[in-house]
Image (cartoon, rainbow, N blue to C red):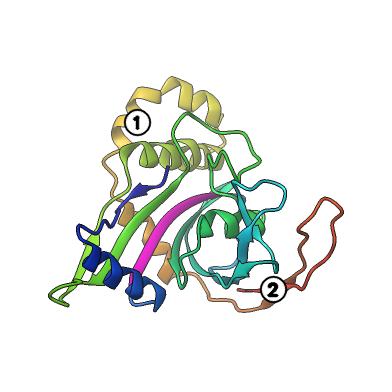
Amino acid sequence: DTSGILLVAKTNRAHRILSDDFKNKRVRRKYIALVHGVIDNNKGKINAPIGRSKLDRKKMCVTDENSKNAVTNFNVLERYKNATLLELILETGRTHQIRVHMEYINHPVVNDSVYGKRKKINDYGQMLHAAYLGFNHPITNEFMEFEVDVEQEFKDIFYVKFFVRDYAKYLGLDGEKLLDDLNEFLFDYTSRIPLDKIKKSQNTKKEETKKIVSPYTVSKSKTNVAPHKIIY
């Protein structure tokens, strides 16, 4: 259900080269995600291995057993009352990595029906978007970059559902009533606001650094395994 850029190899040779580039971290990827809850720190790194869940073989999880190293970096773009808009940069490419890591730190991706334990806010899929991809062309070796803006439904949700509601509260108004009264106008107006307008907050917030070590469990019996670092 992730929107955005998808890289497809047309030949076996190109597939082999690109696979090697992914393996050796020569491919650059950036994602945009809306997650539940407010993340206080402006940036962070999640370093926790990912493997197949023993409880549900269709899901992945953070675990020490039969797992691979997984590292996700994130920067806060904007904070809302009950959600945070993030830019995420992957150092590794594990299956469902962002969704698993965000669920692991108790900030699951909004509308994630697999790893999110909270009610979906609408019928749109998970709020995760592949926004940037940079890689060397497998034949010419020319470095190529691609960017794509988030889909309209994505913009509608985080502007209308979060920004407008918070602003209404700031003005002392009933946010829910305001959304009901101005629904059509708001969806039309907010769709014209470019995503980069909300990125300006990145450069004005004070950077904070601290290390948090979080234990986690991997079975029904809640057996503790070795903790992994979340660096903010």
Please say if the residues under marks 2 and 1 sit with CB atoms less than 8 Å apart.
Answer: no
Residue 10 on image: x %, y %: 20, 57
Q: Residue at x 30, y 53 (%)?
A: 6
Mark 2 / mark 1, whichever is N-terminal = 1
Q: Quadrant of residue 106?
A: bottom right
Foreground of the two, 40 or 4: 4
Tell whether 15 sits left or right of 118.
Answer: left
Tell whether 83 sits left or right of 138.
Answer: right
Foreground of the two, 178 or 48: 48
Residue 218 on image: x %, y %: 76, 58
Q: Name the residue that disc number 1 marks.
A: 187
| Labelled disc at residue 102 | none
82 shown above or below 224: above
Q: Name the residue that disc number 2 marks.
A: 228
Residue furthest left as drawn:
140
Position of the C terminus, as image quadrant, is bottom right
- Going by the numbered disc 2, the residue's amino acid type is His
Q: Is residue 40 visible?
A: no
Disc 1 residue crowd, few under 14, some 14–19, many 20+, Cα 10 Å: some
Residue furthest top as drawn:
181
Residue 73 on image: x %, y %: 50, 70
- Going by the numbered disc 1, the residue's amino acid type is Phe
The segment highlighted magenta reads 27-35
Q: Residue at x 32, y 42 (%)?
A: 151
